[in-house]
Image (cartoon, rainbow, N blue to C red):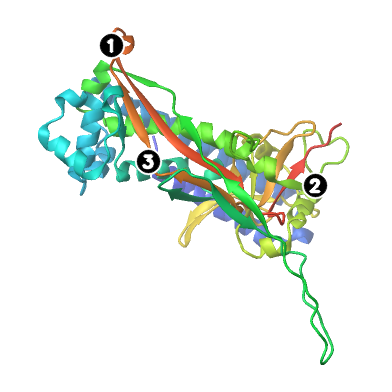
Amino acid sequence: MQSIQALRERRATIAQSIHKLLDDHPGDKWNAALQEKYDAGMKEIEDIADESKRVQQVLDLIAENAETGQVRNLFERQAHEEKRPAHLDAFWNLMRRGEKLVTPEEWSALRNTMSVGTSAQGGYTVPTEVSASLADALKAYGGVRSVAEVFRTTAGNDINFPTTDGTTETGELIGENTTATGSDPSFGVVTLKTYKFSSKVVAIPFELLQDSQIDMEAFIRNRLVTRLGRATNTYFTTGTGTGQPQGIVTAASSGKVGTTGQTLTVIYDDLVDLVHSVDPAYRALGKCRFMMADSSLKVIRKLKDTAGRPIFLPGYDGLGGPMPDTLLGYGITINQDVAAMAANAKSILFGDFTFYKIRDVMDIQIFRFDDSAYIKLGQIGFLAWMRSGGSFVDVGGAVKYYQNSAT
């Protein structure tokens, strides 16, 4: 079984060869033999991806076996132990054992670094490092948060963002001793609210909590992040903005509608039209990219330009840093909450997503439940609450969508 690193290196080598193949053969030189090489390279990349999943499953199984004391995930543990503040261990010991078994020294460390919440219900405001760790993991989870501008506030009151559209404003040429024309810009306001999200209760068996070899911090954090990531991303993508965050799809304006028959497809020309529907002033900022579901990317990977060359280029880890997958020269973000291609579906977004603002209220609370409802099942319950909000603060059309044809 090859290591994950070896598989990544193989993928990078193949991806680089595909890039070179396209660079060395412009449209007038592209032919069936070159297409066959491209397809073979992409097939090998897919095979490597499948093999990587199998290797990861084995690694996950090894980590899971640690729950019975057979194996310990040394890398994760070492990452937490290196230069690790004492109060972080105290916090996770509190989550593992409950407040009755926390030592006086641990309580002292906790009180010095965090605000203890309503302990009668088992709730505790997490230390800053834990909050930051959860936020970073949420960003890495993907979707809108990975490309939006994310910031934190210590309070949850409404924040007003002033907006103005300067894409059509221009100056004037006037003669000598002529009075300049007045043209005041118009301003608006977008209010960024916060909303409350829960992870739902994560029930963990006694055996898992009592096994000292288990990295409970990683286990609980990953479960909470997965649930909160999915919940918030759905609203950041398609939220109505009324009683919930405004989703980026809801806020975006139309860039291109597919012609009749394109209910499940998109053509090369329409992608070009979508890119150019976003004002060059935004594209010049260098932050524009595509966003779509994985099923839409599958359709696009089969598209060719007018010279018959594939328009999708696989990414790889190069000496200068990671090179992402690109489409028409722009990066791609996979967001499974964007609609799959279907009649009237807004299936592809393009633009500068940094104009979408996500605001997190800093304090995150984790609750520990050890009441009879869980004890009789041999479990302890954990629940995380977070307050967050999202809204699109641009009025000049920084993000546009492609909509499939109705018929």
Whether residue 204 appears in this view of the structure is yes
Looking at the rendered structure, the kind of residue marked 2 is Lys
In front of the other: label 3 or label 2? 3
Pointer 2 residue: 256
Element type where label 3 sits in the image: loop
Which x, y percent locates residue 371?
29, 14
Pointer 3 residue: 363
Q: Quadrant of residue 295?
A: top right
167 on left or right of 208: right
Query: Which residue sits furthest left?
Result: 104
Q: Quick one: label 2, few (<14), some, or many (20+) residues within 10 Å?
A: many
Say the numbered circle drawn on residue 375: 1
Residue located 64% across and 38% down the image: 241
Q: Quadrant of residue 128?
A: top left
Label 3, label 2: how many angstroms apart (C-alpha)?
Answer: 41 Å
Callout 3–callout 2 Cβ contact below 8 Å? no
Q: Quick one: label 1, few (<14), some, or many (20+) residues within 10 Å?
A: some
Whether residue 332 appears in this view of the structure is no
Q: Quadrant of the C terminus?
A: top right
Element type where label 1 sits in the image: helix
N-term mark: 3 or 2: 2
220 on left or right of 38: left
Looking at the rendered structure, the kind of residue marked 3 is Asp
Q: Above or below — where is 329 with respect to 198?
A: below
Which x, y percent locates residue 307?
79, 55
Query: Which residue sits furthest right?
Result: 260
203 on left or right of 140: left
N-term mark: 1 or 2: 2
N-term mark: 3 or 1: 3
Residue located 62% across and 40% down the image: 246
